Image (cartoon, rainbow, N blue to C red):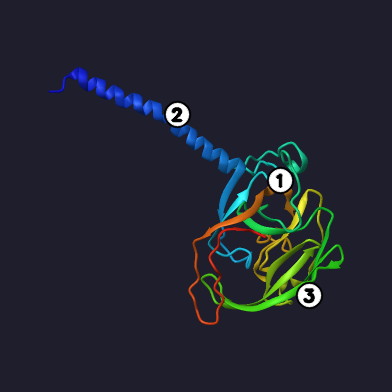
């Protein structure tokens, strides 16, 4: 037989247990918030604009302290500009060739592109070729590829290795050398801004496009961090004869 005193004692023990566990659970929540808000975050690739480097469905990890912190770096953007260089605490510029995540200057949507031009650079796209400060950036053909676009039609592209600096080569896709954005510029990158391109050059709304859809010059303040690794891929294209189907990635560095 259970007495009222025993019942009260049992309830008190349960309550004491809950009170003891709540601080621990709050510490875990706070640690996750700090980790995602200030150190690393995970994002999802929704489009083909960074092929062949990144594929639709890739889950990437972003180093949020690579360039310091701005009002946009935490989970919920703070509107005021923070003190410090480039409107960032511990602020620094990305390097040419870095793949970055950022908040679109007008829509606030998270984008992922590659830094091509730094403040003061003269960037031009002429006949499908990239020029930086008057120097044409050479490219080597790797292959011709045919693939099915995400939820769309079949597309052909040329796979190139492009040398954007003396110590940096990247891989890009080009549908051709006469698309809308293949003759653009020259652009003089303003102070506190960078110039970004997608690796899938003819399927990317980037700094070559200053309309509402494009990015235009990107304020350094809007950068969230440097994209460092593909953690895993959760989208797999259906294998079709003669069509490229990208391999799944697992904890692979982003080059």
Residue sitting at x 86%, y 62%: 133
x and y, in percent, of residue 251 in the image: 56, 57
Pick the residue in front: 52 or 187.
52
Residue at image position (72%, 41%) is: 88
Tag 3 or tag 1, which sits nearer the N-term?
Answer: 1
Instruction: Name the spot of residue 232 as percent of width and height, x first.
Output: 53, 58
Q: Which mark is residue 226?
A: none
Using the rendered image of the protein, determine whether residue 102 is visible from the camera's viewpoint. Answer: no
Q: Earlier in the sequence, mark 1 or mark 2?
A: 2
Residue 224, compared with residue 208, is above or below; it is: above
Report crowding for label 3: few under 14, some 14 to 19, many 20 or more residues within 10 A (C-alpha): some
Label 1–label 3 contact, CB within 8 A: no
* Residue at position x 73%, y 50% in the image: 219
Relative side of 13 to 80, left or right: left
Residue occupied by mark 2: 23
| Label drawn at residue 127 | 3
Relative horizontal placement of residue 252, taking residue 3 as reference (left or right): right
Asked whether, in this view, residue 130 is left or right of residue 205, the answer is right
Q: Which quadrant of the structure image shows residue 65?
A: top right
Residue 239: x percent and y percent?
Answer: 49, 76
Q: How many marks overall?
A: 3
- Horizontal side of 180 relative to 46 (left or right) equals right
Q: CA distance from mark 3 to mark 2?
A: 62 Å
Marks 1 and 2 sit apart, C-alpha to C-alpha, by 33 Å
The crowding category of the residue bearing disc 1, from other C-alpha atoms within 10 Å (few below 14, some 14 to 19, many at least 20), is many
**Front position in the image: 78 or 148:** 148
* Disc 1/disc 3 C-alpha distance (Å): 33 Å
Which of the pair 155/185 is nearer the observer? 155
Q: Are marks 3 and 2 in contact (CB under 8 Å)?
A: no
> Residue at label 1?
67
Measuring from the top left, give residue 164's x and y in whole percent. Answer: 78, 64
Q: Quadrant of the N terminus?
A: top left
């Amino acid at each position: 037989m259970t007495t009222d005193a025993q019942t009260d004692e049992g309830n008190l023990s349960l309550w004491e247990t809950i009170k003891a566990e709540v601080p621990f659970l709050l510490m875990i929540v706070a640690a996750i918030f700090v980790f995602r808000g200030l150190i690393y975050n995970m994002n999802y690739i929704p489009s083909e604009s960074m092929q062949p480097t990144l594929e639709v469905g890739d889950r990437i990890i972003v180093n949020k302290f690579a360039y310091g912190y701005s009002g946009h770096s935490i989970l919920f953007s703070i509107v005021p500009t923070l003190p410090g260089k480039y409107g960032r605490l511990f602020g620094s510029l990305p390097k040419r060739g870095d793949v970055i995540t950022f908040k679109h200057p007008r829509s606030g949507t998270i984008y992922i592109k590659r830094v091509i031009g730094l403040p003061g650079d003269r960037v031009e796209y002429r006949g499908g070729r990239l020029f930086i400060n008057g120097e044409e950036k050479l490219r080597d053909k790797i292959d011709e590829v045919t693939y099915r676009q995400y939820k769309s039609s079949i597309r052909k592209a040329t796979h190139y290795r492009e040398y954007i600096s003396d110590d940096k080569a990247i891989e890009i896709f080009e549908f051709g050398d006469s698309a809308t954005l293949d003759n653009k510029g020259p652009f003089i990158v303003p102070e506190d801004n960078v110039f970004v391109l997608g690796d899938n050059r003819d399927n990317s709304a980037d700094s070559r496009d200053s309309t509402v859809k494009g990015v235009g010059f990107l304020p350094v303040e809007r950068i969230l961090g440097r994209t460092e690794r593909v953690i895993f891929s959760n989208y797999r294209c259906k294998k079709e004869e003669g069509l490229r189907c990208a391999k799944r990635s697992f904890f692979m560095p982003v080059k």
